[in-house]
Image (spheres, helix red, strand yellow):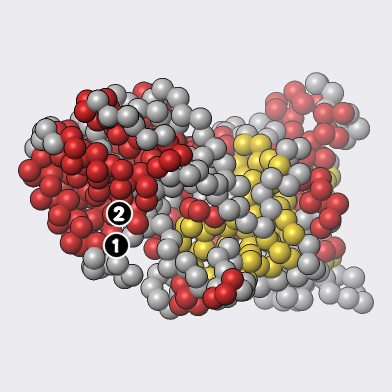
Amino acid sequence: MTRPLLLTVIFATLLADGVCAQSPPMQKAEDSARAVSKQLRTHMTPTPGVGWNEFQLRIVDSIGKDDFATTAGWEDWGDGKPTPFVTITRGYLVVAKTPDALALIIGRELARLSLGLAPPKGEPRSDATDADADLYAVKLVLRSGYSVRRGLAGMLLEKGRPAWADRIAKLLEKPDESLWRIMPAFESGMMFLAIEQHTNATACFEVVTKEFPLSHEAWANLGYARLMHYFDYSSAVRSGHVLGTSHIRSSVKATSPDKEQWASAVRALQEAEKLKPGQPRVLANLGLAYTIPPNGVPHAEDAEKYLVAALTALKEQPNPSLAGEIELLVNVAVVRISTNKTADARKVLDQAAALATKLPGGPPARYTQAITFNRALALAADGKPSEAIKLLVRFLETTQQYDPWWSEGYQHYLVLCKQLKLEPRPRDALRKPTKQQLQTATLASGKTVRPGNAPDDVLSMLGKPSRQSPIAPRISLLRWSLDTQGIELIVQPDEEVLVVVLVSKKSGVPWPKTGPCGRPAGDLRVGMSREQVEALPGGADFALRPFAPQTSVYAYYPEWDLTVVYDRDGTDGVVKAIIVGSGKE
């Protein structure tokens, strides 16, 4: 039994206020406790031979003589397997006013049951410790979408806080990465980053940093999401084509640069650098931020400082990323063009171009486009506008109009045409506009679902989800798990499905590119090897994002807003999930 020591005066005050089992406030508290209990149990790992389907949450006036207590145990029916229960007193419900606090209290008792610390009658107690139960409870609460930090804040009555709550508070002082990574907000934030939905990713990682303010990874991800969001909505014409930014901007209406958004990105990245100094991706993104500030002109000293530091840190890695080195060199060249060091910039661009030929499959199109763009600007700065125009035209003819750098290249082209008194070619004469080919998930039943579907239509077609979880407290997004269909959905209630995630072989995505003679290339499915995916037409043409979070296991195809998630880095990786985006920021 867990018995917090509460001052008798608290209970007397509650009685004086008329709180009893029959009052509306108490009924609301009981309903909340049952809802929390149900949510927690849907996220527990099933235990073989245990009748969790018959679980009971028992709400009583007292346990023995205690009015503020919880306990857990098993009901032995004699003719079947024992069924678990948790008992909590009504007095405790009133003191623990928030769902987060209730989740911690009930979750701690569920941990004792699941780990064998409160075994059925006649069975031995397990070797698990109270510390194991604390950790189990924290992970269960986080996995279920509740806040441990707010839960503890809801149990701050000095006389009423159990000892395990203090131990859990200490867990948060030096958190393990397994804690923040288990949060739905973290998992969903990674999904949103994978398909470049940076607004939602920002909201998710803001939740994670509030829960785990000492998580360098959460701050790094938040800084990256904010920086990409700033870039997505910024209309500034910059000093050059950097690498490391978003790939698509077709659904975003660019506006004047948001200085505060840029500054908040820098602050988050600096916090990540303070918590864990010397991470190449944090240094690279700080360098990128100072290369694309709101006025469009690089903060040359800060930008080069961080970019060079990132290059140094990258080369000290056991297996340094060649793509990362190329990206940093291109961005260094942009900084040097902005300070009229064009000879140095051209040397750095030549170095980047030479390295790009060493990548598997040769130089990626985006790297070639960025190098061409920046060589053009270097020529223009050297007083060679005619040669610069030729390179800009090559860039504009080989780059999709929905690429965010196309419009910037066209603006530079117009300036040079005006300088030379030439009639500029119309936008569509240089490159006809195209749209992303958005994808649809095909289920084993033959039914299909895609981002943009109305949630009610999906429910009527597929039935209720096996599990439903909020992405994070105070974020109006839900994550639906439909186990029988092999998919998960991120949904904006009453509006639309935002993301479809394939998590088993039960569903697939028809591969967007056809094979020889226009024949379908087959379906993309969970369980395929990386080698099989990259052998598909265009399968090796995913975006290189060396300084995005967990880039080695995410293969993003911008043209289709599709991301393949592998179980590990390397050529032997296997597809563990497929994320289908909506083409919207």
One can see residue 404 in this view: no
Which of these two is toward me, 178 or 267?
Answer: 267
List the residue tagged with mark 2. 367
Q: Residue 257: percent from the left, percent from the top?
A: 39, 25
Q: Is residue 154 left or right of residue 265?
A: right
Residue positioned 54% across, 52% down in the render: 561
Disc 1 packing (10 Å; few <14; some 14–19; many ≥20): some
Q: Which of the image's four quarters has the C terminus?
A: top right
Q: Quadrant of residue 224?
A: top left
The image quarter containing residue 51 is bottom right
Q: Position of residue 241 (x, y in %)?
A: 29, 41
* Residue 419: image location, x then y, percent: 22, 25
Please say if 517 is above or below 434.
below
On residue 363, the disc is 1
**Contact, CB < 8 Å: mark 2 with mark 1?**
yes
Q: Residue at (78%, 62%) from the top-left corner?
A: 447
Viewer-side residue, 483 vs 379: 379
What amino acid does circle 1 point to?
A: Pro
234 with respect to 453 (left or right) = left
Q: Is residue 80 visible?
A: yes
How far apart marks 2 and 1 lie (CA) works out to 7 Å
Type of residue at label 2? Tyr
Does residue 522 appear to the left or right of 326 in the view shown?
A: right
